[in-house]
Image: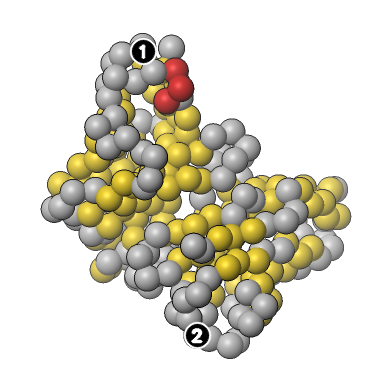
């Protein structure tokens, strides 16, 4: 069975600094997708970034980038130039052929002014 | 990006009553929608997959007779919590998988803003 693990329940970062959130997953599939979602206090889930497993190039979206290590089954999120608005719960998610998402337990990110 | 709405945003009901939650994809068609439940400070747990024109697929441990799902059109899925009890109080979130339109790739799910249910 597929599993997604986020080993950091909480992280803190100073404003304007860089932080990396960790995510590992377990699967026997070769074709799948990985996502990072942000859930602010409003609880609206917001897509941050996505990665197709068949692509070797790491995805980037402005200040957000991933380090995708397929062999190690690792998918970390790097947030550069952290802003106060980045404070939220961050969930790593895995999706394979059934279209169902499997979510990690989340990492709460605090941004310190 | 694609927009998903949910209604109501919060509802308070008495124990034993039924509550219906609507999930709509506003600018795209969604043959598949998903219903999640989220307890405070926890992750999202998938309850069921809603398929347009067919029966929903429930995850293990989810009572299909208690959580009725209807996906009658390409833009609307409903979750009805029947005979609600205090233990059903939770935050319910729907998502929609983009099938066509919306200008986004189909592998991505877009989430509604959630519905907070409180059963007294």
Badge 1: how crowded within 10 Å, few (<14), some, or many (20+)?
some
Marked residue chain, label 1: B
Does the rendering let one see residue B84?
Answer: yes
The structure residue drawn at horizontal position 47% and vertical position 34%, both measured from the top left corner, is: B91
Residue depicted at 76% across the width and 65% down the height: A20
Front-lying residue, B54 or B110: B54
Q: State left or right for residue B24 relative to residue A88.
A: left
Q: Where's residue A15, x and y in %?
A: 83, 55
- Residue annotated with mark 1: B15
Q: Is residue A84 visible?
A: no
Q: Secondary structure at mark 1?
A: loop
Front residue of A67 and A102: A102
Q: Please give the chain letter of the residue carrying mark 2.
A: A
Percent coordinates x, y for residue A7 in the rendering: 72, 56
Q: Which mark is residue B78?
A: none
Quadrant of the rendered image containing residue A65: bottom right
User: How crowded is the residue under tag 2: few (<14 C-alpha within 10 Å), some, or many (20+)?
Assistant: few
B113 vs A47: above or below: above
Alpha carbon distance from label 2 to label 1 = 49 Å
In the rendered image, the vertical position of residue A35 relative to residue A70, given as above or below: above
Residue ID for mark 2? A54
Q: Is residue B88 left or right of residue B63?
A: right
Quarter of the image for the N terminus of chain B: give it: bottom left
Q: Are marks 2 and 1 on the same chain?
A: no
Q: Residue B65 in the image: x percent, y percent?
A: 24, 32
Quadrant in the picture for the C terminus of chain B: top left
* Image location of residue A54, percent across then percent down: 50, 85
**In screen coordinates, is B35 left or right of A86?**
left
| Marks 2 and 1 in Cβ contact (< 8 Å) | no
Determine which quarter of the picture holds residue A35.
bottom right
- At x 84%, y 63%, the residue is A17
């Amino acid at each position: 069975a597929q599993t997604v693990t986020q080993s950091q329940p909480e992280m803190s970062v100073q404003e304007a600094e860089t932080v990396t959130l960790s995510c590992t997953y377990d699967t026997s599939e070769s074709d799948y997708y990985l996502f990072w979602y942000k859930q602010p206090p409003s609880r609206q889930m917001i897509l941050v970034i996505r990665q197709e497993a068949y692509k070797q190039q790491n995805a980037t979206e402005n200040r957000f980038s991933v380090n995708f290590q397929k062999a190690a089954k690792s998918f970390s999120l790097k947030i550069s130039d952290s802003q106060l608005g980045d404070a939220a719960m961050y969930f790593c998610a895995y999706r394979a052929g059934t279209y169902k998402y499997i979510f990690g337990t989340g990492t709460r990110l605090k941004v310190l002014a | 990006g694609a927009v998903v709405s949910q209604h109501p945003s919060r509802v308070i009901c008495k124990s034993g009553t039924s509550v219906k939650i609507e999930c709509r994809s506003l600018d795209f068609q969604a043959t598949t929608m998903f219903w999640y439940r989220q307890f405070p400070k926890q992750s999202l747990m998938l309850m069921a997959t809603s398929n347009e024109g067919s029966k929903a697929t429930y995850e293990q441990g989810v009572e299909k007779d208690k959580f009725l799902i209807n996906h009658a059109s390409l833009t609307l899925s409903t979750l009805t919590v029947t005979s609600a009890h205090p233990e059903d109080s939770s935050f319910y979130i729907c998502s929609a998988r983009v099938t066509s339109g919306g200008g986004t790739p189909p592998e991505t799910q877009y989430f509604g803003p959630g519905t907070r249910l409180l059963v007294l």
